[in-house]
Image (cartoon, rainbow, N blue to C red):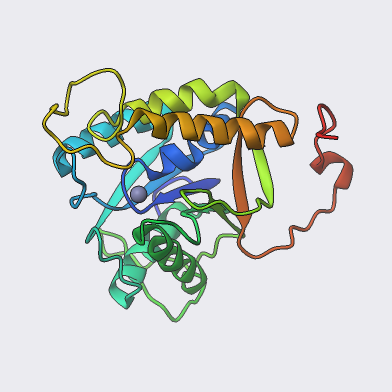
Amino acid sequence: MSTLPKFDVLAVGSHPDDVELGCGGTIASLVATGCHVGILDLTRGELGSRGTPDFREQEASEAANILGVDRRVNLGIADGNIKNSRKNRLKVIAELRATRPDILLIPAPDCRHPDHPDGARLVADAAFQSGLSMIETITPTGTAQEPWRPAHILHYMQSIAFEPTLVVDVSAFWEKRNEAVRAFRSQFHSGSSEGSSADEPETFISNPAFMEWYDARARTYGYRIGATFGEPFLYRHGPIGTDNLVGMLKKEKPFR
Ligand SMILES: [Zn+2]
């Protein structure tokens, strides 16, 4: 038996900062409604051109505090080499069985950075196998874990767009999301030089235009649901079922 309380949602990133960028507003909105949310980082981002793994760990902890999540774990899988191996799946399965989330938020199915779809595939396969009782895992104290399969898997959007299955209205949480992203001072342009030195190389994500692009995209998807900011998701095993059509659909501010 797990000693952890059950989680509603587990957000998974290939690198520390992936979930803040891709679904930070959604995480903040879930926490605000009383959901129990955890973050799982697959790697320490040690191949990143800026910052160090230790500094990114400190940044990840600060960002988790800003978002208000109850748990953030890093599996320490090799950055740049997220193999869908039995060893790595067992690491993910142990965390899924420990936290027992109903909903998994995972990286994009396609991206300019191969670690993102590689991470998505690893976690999706681990989520399936986590439900198989013949795959045995134990807690750090040696207790056997019960099988657990999350009911729903959603991809958050990264650098390559998809037509989203759903968009979460994060208008009230966009500033908190930005605050959490800015906690990764070594990675992004924040107006502060603390934690990153001016002689570090500029990267795809450290350019100020990167943040403006994310902002514009959140406005674009937000507009399509009648909100100011929205985070797009792709339901992995569509279509989405409902037994409450009226309750499921947003009643106000439709896009029409
Ligand atoms: Zn990443």
Q: Nearer the viewer, residue 167 or 103?
A: 167
Query: Is 130 situated above or below 186?
Result: below
Residue 17 percent location from the top left of the image: 35, 40
**Number of on-image labels:** 0
Query: Is 201 situated above or below 212?
Result: below
- Left or right, 44 with respect to 125, comes to left
Q: Residue at x 46, y 45 (%)?
A: 5
Where on the picture, by quarter, is residue 26?
A: top right
Residue 12 percent location from the top left of the image: 42, 51
Q: Residue at x 61, y 30 (%)?
A: 219
Query: Is 107 situated above or below 205?
Result: below
Q: Nearer the viewer, residue 153 or 210?
A: 210
Where on the picture, by quarter, is residue 91?
A: bottom left
Image quadrant occupied by the C terminus: top right
Q: Residue at x 17, y 38 (%)?
A: 201
Residue 90 percent location from the top left of the image: 34, 70
Residue 202 percent location from the top left of the image: 23, 37
Q: Residue lying furthest top in this view? A: 191
- Left or right, 230 with respect to 193, comes to right
Q: Residue at x 17, y 35 (%)?
A: 55
**Residue 7 seen in the current view:** no
Q: Residue lying furthest bottom in this view? A: 134
- Left or right, 134 with respect to 59, comes to right
Image quadrant occupied by the N terminus: bottom left
**Residue 162 seen in the current view:** yes
